[in-house]
Image (tube, coloured by chain):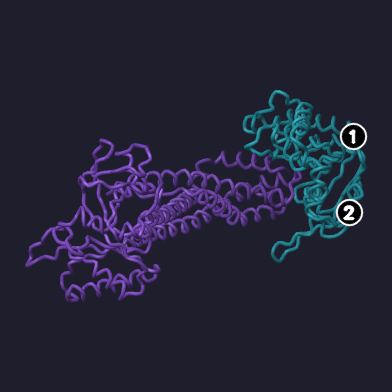
């Protein structure tokens, strides 16, 4: 008896009880859709985290100046720059876990070139900034030591700035005016894309010294800086280093352990961890639902198949009398339960896709559909069908032809 | 074709042992039409089931076309039933979800014939029992006589050597019953051996040989001179 004949016979008997077949597969439907949703939540979170690391670099802490409240009056975010290059040197010296630190001064200003105007954020920093922020060059180069030390008027621009000033033309060696000061463009950065709150490509980067001398001399006098990006040697050291930085900074700024600091440390990993943690909790929840409903679904299939075998005892006897072997009967019932579970699997996949679509639209969660999860669902549901269908099928196959024929 | 030597069949029901067949000797030649008669409990159905390889004897030998059936396993028995034996039951025993053709195709499915040949054989069998215009009706859309014809078509589709009919007219009115008997008679005339179980003299007399059973023993075995 060929497999197509078996499938034909099975679908006949399933269709004669279509409501029962679908109700039976309900457990599988819920189980499979949970599996699919679970996997795509998990891999969506993973991909999002990877993308964020790609954008912002990994193992970074950002220390930023913060106006400490002075007798209860906040001085405003940008009013005071409490960080200095001395702080940076001290941190480097005190904490061996720190691999590199990129200082940063910044201002928002008018850029003019090619007869075009554009308002962009200008950053003054060192070459470390590019490594730490995972910036890559589409064209041109980073700063040379001579340019950094002498305060040359050279600039590296992001894609958005290029687009608005030069359209698609090569900006290298062109002159742009930042705050009326002419700069020569020496590099063009690769696009990173926007985040929800900022366009990372809307940037102009110049050497720290140049910025301090020519652009922000008033805003960042002496060795004041706006912030620094600290790169930690490994992710295991990240959280410990965050505490150490806090301690050292408090010591440098003479702030007691429970005093109000004049700086703030941002650990991007914190956000990523929270994101991963919440999707992990969600995944565990769904995995539990999936596991329970797959088992319950399997038991449901077994239950219905046992009923079916009993109902069709006489029929089994008839089949045996016309020459069905044990194997034929076994296969037929196995295929029936397999079909129930696979139909459940298919409906479950459709439902899961719906849930994924709904959740990612509604919650703006990144969900990634893994083909693996569809394959896995098929494997899950078919093995459930076979495992839980086996006992009833064997019971049918082991019937004695005479007893089965006489069964009323 | 059939050789039965000192065959017994014992059923154990709790503490009681029931001797359904008691030391039976019987041989049936190819082409015979044998009617087995007897009241219920006489062992005629048990004998029939053993001849049909649905059941195995407790002791004694049963040779079917040189196969010692007592030594065969369930797969071999299934194969014998599939290729050499056709059953016609009192209650037709058709599968309710399948139409006439599909019911007739069923034994051919198990013998592994390809679908083209299966359908050809099934149509031929249905045609020969006069159901050419009822091919795609399901059992509940057919009369009793028509259902019995389908079941005869199912029995002969695989061109068996032996047809076992267990009270084939039992659920039919007498006119329809006679039509069915005529079909069986025609099949016998084409050379198919027929073993018929019945308790009606009217039906039994179609046989060329009538065997009467009682209490698991053969009481009488004689040629039917009227036939």
Q: Which of the 4 quarters of the picture holds residue B206?
A: top right
Label 2 neighbourhood size at 10 Å, few (<14), some (14-19), many (20+)?
few
Helix, strand or loop under label 2: strand
Q: Colour of chain A?
A: purple
Question: Residue B68 has which mark?
Answer: 2
Q: Is residue A187 above or below residue A243?
A: above
What residue sits right under mark 1 in the picture? Answer: B191
Tell me where residue B127 appears, x and y as whole percent. 77, 26
Residue A172 in the figure: left or right of residue B9: left
Q: Earlier in the sequence, mark 1 or mark 2?
A: 2
Residue A405 makes an appearance in the image: no
Tell me where residue A141 appears, x and y as whole percent. 39, 52
Which chain does the numbered disc 1 sit on? B
Tell me where residue B187 appears, x and y as whole percent. 84, 32
Q: Which of the 4 quarters of the picture holds residue A119?
A: top left
Between the C-alphas of marks 1 and 2, the distance is 23 Å
Q: Where the N terminus of chain A falls, by quadrant?
A: top right
Q: Is residue A53 above or below residue A197?
A: below
B150 or A347: nearer the eye? A347
Tell me where residue A250 appears, x and y as whole percent. 21, 73
Residue at (44%, 49%) from the top-left corner? A368
Q: Colour of chain B?
A: cyan
């Amino acid at each position: 008896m060929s497999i197509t004949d078996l499938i034909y016979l099975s679908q006949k008997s399933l269709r004669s009880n279509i409501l029962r077949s679908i109700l039976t597969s309900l457990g599988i439907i819920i189980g499979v859709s949970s599996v699919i949703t679970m996997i795509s939540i998990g891999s969506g979170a993973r991909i999002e985290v990877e993308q964020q690391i790609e954008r912002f670099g990994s193992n970074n802490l950002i220390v930023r100046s913060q106006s400490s409240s002075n007798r209860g009056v906040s001085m405003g975010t940008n009013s005071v720059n409490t960080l200095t290059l001395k702080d940076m040197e001290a941190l480097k010296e005190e904490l061996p876990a720190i691999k590199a630190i990129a200082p940063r001064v910044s201002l928002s200003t008018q850029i003019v070139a090619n007869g075009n105007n554009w308002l962009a954020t200008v950053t003054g920093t060192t070459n470390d900034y590019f490594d730490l922020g995972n910036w890559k060059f589409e064209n041109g180069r980073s700063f040379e030591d001579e340019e950094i030390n002498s305060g040359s008027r050279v600039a590296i621009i992001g894609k958005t700035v290029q687009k608005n000033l030069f359209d698609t033309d090569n900006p290298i060696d062109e002159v742009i005016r930042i705050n009326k000061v002419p700069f020569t463009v020496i590099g063009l950065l690769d696009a990173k894309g926007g985040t929800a709150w900022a366009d990372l490509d809307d940037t102009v980067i110049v050497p720290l010294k140049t910025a301090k001398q020519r652009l922000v001399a008033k805003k960042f006098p002496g060795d004041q800086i706006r912030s620094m990006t600290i790169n930690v040697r490994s992710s295991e050291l990240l959280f410990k280093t965050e505490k150490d930085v806090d301690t050292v900074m408090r010591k440098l700024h003479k702030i007691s352990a429970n005093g109000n600091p004049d700086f703030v440390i941002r650990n991007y990993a914190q956000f990523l961890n929270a994101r991963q943690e919440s999707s992990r909790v969600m995944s565990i929840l769904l995995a539990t639902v999936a596991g329970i409903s797959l088992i319950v679904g399997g038991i449901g299939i077994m239950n219905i198949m046992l009923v079916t075998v009993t109902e069709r005892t006489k029929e089994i006897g008839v089949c045996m009398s016309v020459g069905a072997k044990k194997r034929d009967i076994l296969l037929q019932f196995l295929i029936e339960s397999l079909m129930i579970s696979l139909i459940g699997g298919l409906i479950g996949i459709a439902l899961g896709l719906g849930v994924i679509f709904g959740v990612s639209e509604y919650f703006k969660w990144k969900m990634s559909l893994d083909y693996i999860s569809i394959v896995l669902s098929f494997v899950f549901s078919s093995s459930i069908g076979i495992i839980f269908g086996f006992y009833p099928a064997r019971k049918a196959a082991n019937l004695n032809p005479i007893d089965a024929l006489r069964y009323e | 074709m059939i050789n039965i030597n000192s065959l017994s069949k014992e059923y154990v029901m709790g503490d009681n042992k029931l001797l359904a067949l008691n030391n039976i000797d019987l041989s049936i030649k190819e082409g015979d039409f044998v009617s087995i008669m007897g009241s219920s409990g006489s062992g005629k159905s048990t004998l029939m089931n053993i001849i049909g390889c649905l059941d195995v004897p407790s002791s004694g030998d049963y040779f079917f076309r040189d196969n010692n059936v007592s030594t065969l396993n369930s797969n071999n028995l299934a194969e014998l039933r599939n290729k050499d034996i056709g059953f016609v039951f009192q209650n037709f025993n058709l599968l309710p979800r399948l139409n006439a053709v599909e019911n007739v195709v069923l034994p051919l499915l198990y013998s592994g014939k390809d679908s083209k040949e299966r359908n050809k054989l099934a149509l031929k069998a249905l045609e020969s029992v006069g159901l050419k215009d009822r091919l795609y009706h399901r059992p509940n859309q057919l009369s009793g006589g028509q259902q019995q014809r389908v079941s005869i078509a199912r029995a002969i589709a695989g061109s068996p050597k032996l047809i076992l009919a267990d009270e084939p007219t039992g659920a039919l009115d007498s006119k329809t019953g006679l039509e069915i008997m005529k079909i069986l008679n025609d099949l016998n005339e084409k050379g198919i051996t027929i073993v018929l179980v019945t308790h009606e003299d009217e039906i039994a007399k179609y046989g060329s040989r009538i065997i009467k059973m009682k209490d698991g023993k053969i009481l009488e075995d004689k040629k039917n001179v009227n036939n």
